[in-house]
Image (spheres, rainbow, N blue to C red):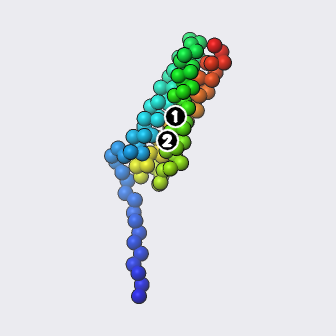
Amino acid sequence: MSVPIMVAEVAPVYGLTSGRVVSLVAALVALAGVGFGGMALFRFVRRRAVIALAAGAVGVVVGGWVVAVAEGGPGTGAGIVGGLVALVLGLVALALGGMALKQS
């Protein structure tokens, strides 16, 4: 007697899932860090450089966590694309904040 094999098809998810929300918030925080890092590099303000470093660190940590625990690829609602964006923007914010802190 043969047992029927069930194949689960993954349908694309179009709504906001918890993975997408977390990765979106992390990407926005990292984007703010890039903005603060650019302003700190332009005007040599130490406080903005520290904010850029903190926001960049949050973006890298949360984005990396989302990418690490995501089950599935893009379009599954796990937030992997937003996690990658947060990871990259966080690294840019860390670099800008570090350069601005070095100059101030």
Residue drawn at x 34%, y 48% as measured from the top left: 14
The kind of residue tagged 1 is Gly
Residue drawn at x 50%, y 50% as measured from the top left: 69
Q: How many marks?
A: 2
Labels 2, 1: front one: 1
Disc nearer the start of the sequence (2/1): 1
Looking at the picture, how far across and down is residue 42, in whole percent? 57, 14
Looking at the picture, how far across and down is residue 36, in whole percent? 51, 21
How busy is the neighbourhood of tag 1: few (under 14 within 10 Å), some, or many (20 plus)?
many
Image quadrant in which you'd find residue 100: top right
Looking at the picture, how far across and down is residue 71, in whole percent? 47, 54
| Residue designated by label 1 | 59
Say whether residue 42 is visible: no
Looking at the picture, how far across and down is residue 23, in whole percent? 45, 40
Q: Quadrant of the C terminus?
A: top right
For this orientation, the residue located farthest to the left is 15
Residue drawn at x 37%, y 46% as measured from the top left: 17
Q: CA distance from mark 2 to mark 1?
A: 8 Å
For this orientation, the residue located farthest to the right is 102
Horizontal side of 28 relative to 50 (left or right) equals: left
Compared with 75, 61 (above or below) is above
Residue drawn at x 51%, y 28% as measured from the top left: 55
The kind of residue tagged 2 is Gly
Compared with 47, 73 (above or below) is below
Horizontal side of 103 relative to 60 (left or right) equals: right
| Residue designated by label 2 | 83
